[in-house]
Image (spheres, grey):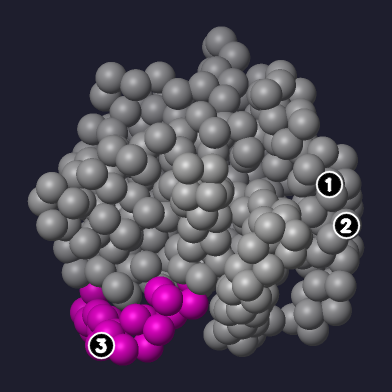
Amino acid sequence: MLKSILIIFQVIIGYNLVLPFLLYIFYTLVKKSRFNRAELKEYDYGIIVTAYEQTALLPAVVSSLLQLNYSNYLIYVVADNCDISDLHFNDPRVILLKPEKVLASNTRSHLYAIANFRRAHEILTIIDSDNLTDPNYLNELNVYFDAGFEAVQGVRAAKNLNTTYACLDAARDIYYHFYDGEVLFQLGSSATLSGSGMAFTTVLYKACFDNLDITGAGFDKVLQAQILRMDKRIAFAKDAIVYDEKTADSGQLVNQRSRWINTWFKYFGYGFDILLRGIKKLNLNQFLFGIILLRPPLFIFILLSGLCCLVNIFIFPIYSLIWVIAFGLFILSFVISLKNHATDPRIYKSLVNIPKFIYFQLLSLVHAKQANKRSVATKHNINS
């Protein structure tokens, strides 16, 4: 009985190492979806920029948005719990909103912006206060809305690679964008949502939060679950790029990852619901997405896999060889994701510091339970 339990536990942990490679094999075999890029409709966008307590980076993100190669949009800056006395935006396309009460919630800020829309925007897109946007960001989103999708996730590329932590953070994002974005989408499932650089029809977004009030981190986890429950797909727009501020030091890393880990434990159960829906309906979109939602954060299944490998040396030596092969496939999968992206050489050089990166994420795990009390949003240095 004990042996059976150990084997089942190892399979549950170990499949996470080989899953990306299996997904990549199927990805290479399927015909890639092609979308029309001619005569795209110029949808009316409401661009929502949320800030909590910090305003130093807002002028940069607004300036970036005003340089979009697009004309049909308005920008709504929600400055929650912020001092806006030094914020001045002279462009009529920028609407600065200061909630009377502290919202301390992404979704509350988004819904506050929607309630104050100057006109009935067809689509809203969510941008963080530390983001910058590629000039063609909205045009690239339109490719997928024109194809009939109601939810689209873009790419959050690294804005800064000035520290080892930032480079490793960027490497992680490249891995997830490839497997949880491009590969999943091309296989007929949905891209996972990343918190910003994403867009939705206004009707869909409001429908997802009609009877929900989400506080703390993780609104994107709830949002994607709601969309999948409606039997809709989230498209992945690999050329719709926002530049995201990566964690520059260990303090930022621990606080941010504490919130993310807390979020996974809080919401991973959605994976069971969506997986079962996919099995009952024979729905590939929900089936694959449910499997992905049940996957632990990278560092957790890597450490647990390493522990299993070491234990097997003394209990089931032959199984250790299987673990070594599984680790090899995972490393290969990680390299494939980097090779499928124009990866900066600094990111490759930073990989030798992965053990240190994992150590700080272990510290994050210790603080995960109190994560939302420690910090509500990542605090960035304007000079980083």
Q: Which residue is mark 3?
A: 31
Depicted 358 relative to depicted 177: above or below:
above
Residue 330 at least partly seen: no
Segment colored magenta: 20-43
- Which corner quadrant holds the C terminus? bottom right
Q: Amino acid at mark 2?
A: Lys
Depicted 227 relative to depicted 175: above or below:
above
Residue 284 at least partly seen: yes
Q: Amino acid at mark 3?
A: Lys
The location of residue 65, given as percent across then percent down, is 55, 57
Query: Badge 2, how many Cα within 10 Å: few under 14, some, many 20+?
Result: some
Q: Which residue shows up at 56% across the image and 66% down it?
A: 17
Pointer 2 with pointer 3, Cβ within 8 A: no
Depicted 367 relative to depicted 89: above or below:
above
Task: State which tag comes first along the sequence, 2 or 3.
Answer: 3
Name the foreground residue: 342 vs 324: 324
Marks 2/3: CA–CA distance: 40 Å
The location of residue 96, given as percent across then percent down, is 55, 33
Q: Which residue shows up at 72% across the image and 56% down it?
A: 311
Q: Which residue is mark 2?
A: 356
Pointer 2 with pointer 1, Cβ within 8 A: yes
